[in-house]
Amino acid sequence: MSNVVSSSRSVPLVDLKAQYASIRDEVRGAIDEVLEGMQLTIGPNVRAFDEEFAAFCGAKHAIGVGSGTDALQLVIRALGISAGDEVITVSHTFFATVEAILYSGARPVLVDVDERTFNMDPDAVARAITPRTKAIMPVHIYGRTVDMKPLLAVAKEHGLQIIEDACQAHGSRLDTGGMAGSAGRASAFSFYCSKNLGAYGEAGSIVTNDDELAKELRSLREHGQSVRYYHPVVGYNARLDELQAAILRVKLRRLPAWNARRAAIAARYNELLADTAVITPNIPTEGRHVFHCYVVRVPDGRRDALRQALAERNIGTGVHYPVPVHLQEACEFLGYRRGDLPMTERLADEVLSLPMYPELSDADVELVARTVKDCVAGAQRLAA
Ligand SMILES: Cc1ncc(COP(=O)(O)O)c(C=O)c1O
């Protein structure tokens, strides 16, 4: 994929510096306030952020924790899922989704995804249910929400819990009308730095409407204590810290505008890349995609060549993710083989994430799309 005019301007996959520049004074003010007060663990900012994030998700409770992985792990533990149980989820996800299930001793049962949405196939879920199934864990991949109505029906019919992995979907809408995270018994969010709502370090949150569960999760995040230094159960050190909470409060106020900009960029990319050899993502209506990643498919084994050609022209890209979880070395003991989840495996070979962040200018979106088109056309000419 050569013979294409090079651009001197570079466009990264994600630009955290651009976002920081737009909120620098407010973030610094918030950090200073925490440092002046020296209340560094659970304090006014964590309590306020928990309330603000719960309200944002339209849920009763949010429990700030150390990461999205902590969030998933604590929910699984609080729901009593353990060795001998099965949890149905997808292989087309970040490894932590499955890791959190494995920590509990339960078996992750991995199902294939739908070609149009990249999300859990509800028919595959129904087929995977056994007497040992305790929960279904849909992952709103790239920020597009899973069709929850069929899953909620299947869960109800079989008495199963739903745990939403909403780690990539802050502010995305569900087909139920609520926000991502509001339909499961409890849901996990990650505030990893590059997420739509990202901390300046590690952070996460659990969202639930269940008062009892929320109480238990608040205890589990602090070593299982009920009152300070009294520990009815063994818990974890999984607290959100005050500095991250203060930063997240500043950023949460901007999230709806940032998500709207991401959606506009995605729509523009789709327009500019129509009628090319790359397959653009399907865009659902009603705010059901917040484009944590903008992911195209590059068929016919040409993804890596296109990626290389774009890198040579200073366009950053990503592959989310190159090896599906069921084919990871660490998961060999689960006994999956290549060919078990055909669509998941195909996506791992074809997906390519293009630059996506709210500060991306219209000119840069056009430059990226033009460069993709040039590289693809150049490759076609060479192949002809
Ligand atoms: C789908 C998904 N699940 C879980 C996680 C884990 O979150 P964290 O990195 O905050 O532990 C992530 C974050 O990268 C994710 O994208």
Image (cartoon, grey):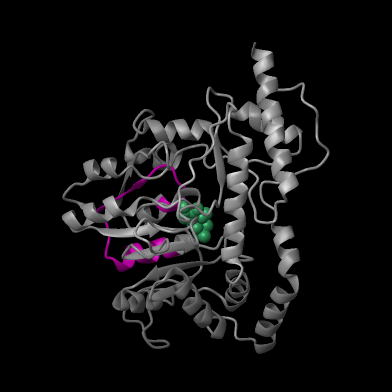
Along the line of sight, which residue is nearer the eye, 80 or 322? 322
Compared to residue 206, the image places residue 163 above or below, namely: above
The range drawn in magenta is 71-97
Q: Is residue 77 one of those drawn in magenta? A: yes
Along the line of sight, which residue is nearer the eye, 93 or 299? 299
How far from the left and from the top, in percent, is residue 6?
80, 31
Side (left or right) of 278 relative to 83: right
Side (left or right) of 34 relative to 107: right
Q: Which residue corresponds to the image point at 71% horizontal and 81% vertical from the top-left?
A: 32
Q: Which residue corresponds to the image point at 76% horizontal and 34% vertical from the top-left?
A: 313
Image quarter of residue 10? top right
Given the current orientation, which residue lies at the most extreme right position?
A: 8
Q: Which residue corresponds to the image point at 52% horizontal and 77% vertical from the top-left?
A: 49
Q: Quadrant of the N terminus?
A: top right
Residue 96 visible in image? yes
Compared to residue 53, the image places residue 323 above or below, namely: above
Given the current orientation, which residue lies at the most extreme top position?
A: 384
Image quarter of residue 45? bottom right
Q: Is residue 22 one of those drawn in magenta? A: no
Compared to residue 382, the image places residue 120 above or below, namely: below
Number of numbered callouts drawn: 0
How far from the left and from the top, in percent, is residue 104?
33, 58
